Each structure stands twice: as C-alpha cells, then as structure tokens.
Amino acid sequence: MRSFLIRIIVLTTLGVSLSGCAAALVGGLIYKSTKSNEEKANFVTNLQKTNLEREKAHLKPLDWCSEAYKFDKGWATENPECGQRVAAYEGGDKTALAQ
C-alpha cells in the first residue's frame, strides 16, 4: 500500500511539473516559428528593394538563391531548383551559386 501511495505522489508531481514545461516548450516553438517567418518576410522585402535599386543603377539584380543561402541555408534548400544549386555548390562547384 505504501509503495502504491508513493507511486501516485511521484506520478502526480511529475504530471504537474511536466505540464508546465510542455506549455513553455510549445510557446517557445510558436514564438521561434513566428520570428523566423517575420525574418524571412523582411529578407524578401529587403532583397526586392535592393534589386530595384540595382536595376535603377543599371546593375544586375542579386540572385535569390545565392542570397537566401547566405541568409538561411535550410530555407534556401526548400526550393527544389535552389536545393540542387546548393548541393552542387557544397559538392565543390563554386559557380553554382554565382548566377
């Protein structure tokens, strides 16, 4: 009987303490995801502004894949074409991202 009570107390204590951790963990993941999406949106906006200014100055626009790779390799490789270029670049083809 005593070991049964100890198990109930331990399980109850763990349940209460871990439920708080789970809520904090989920909240942190949601915040990180939101921040990441905001950063990506800012990156795209800034790249578009930069390319517009470059076009006005009669310069070649910056390549999205190359700039996205510098910004966030994982995000850049989500695009299939860019993923192939990144793989080629990391495989030794230094011209794959220089377009």
Image: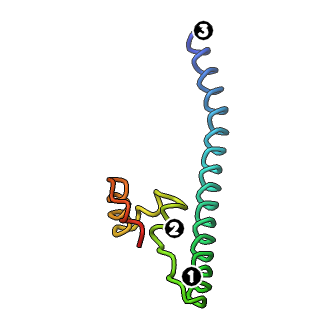
Q: In the figure, residue 45 lies in which quadrant? A: bottom right
Quickly name the residue at label 1.
51
Q: How far apart are marks 1 and 2 (CA)?
A: 11 Å
x and y percentages locating residue 55 in the rendered image: 56, 88
Name the residue located 62 percent from the left edge and 75 percent from the top edge.
46
Numbered label attached to residue 67: 2
x and y percentages locating residue 70 in the rendered image: 52, 61
Which mark is nearer the camera, 2 or 3? Answer: 2
Nearest to the observer: residue 6 or residue 59: 59
Q: Distance between the residues labelled 3 and 1?
A: 73 Å
Q: Do the residues labelled 3 and 1 touch (CB within 8 Å)?
A: no
x and y percentages locating residue 30 in the rendered image: 61, 55
Above or below, 87 against 19 in this view is below
Above or below, 38 against 15 in this view is below
Secondary structure of the residue carrying tag 1 is: helix
Quickly name the residue at label 3.
2
Nearest to the observer: residue 74 or residue 91: 91
Q: Distance between the residues labelled 2 and 3?
A: 64 Å
Amino acid type at circle 3 is Arg
Amino acid type at circle 2 is Glu
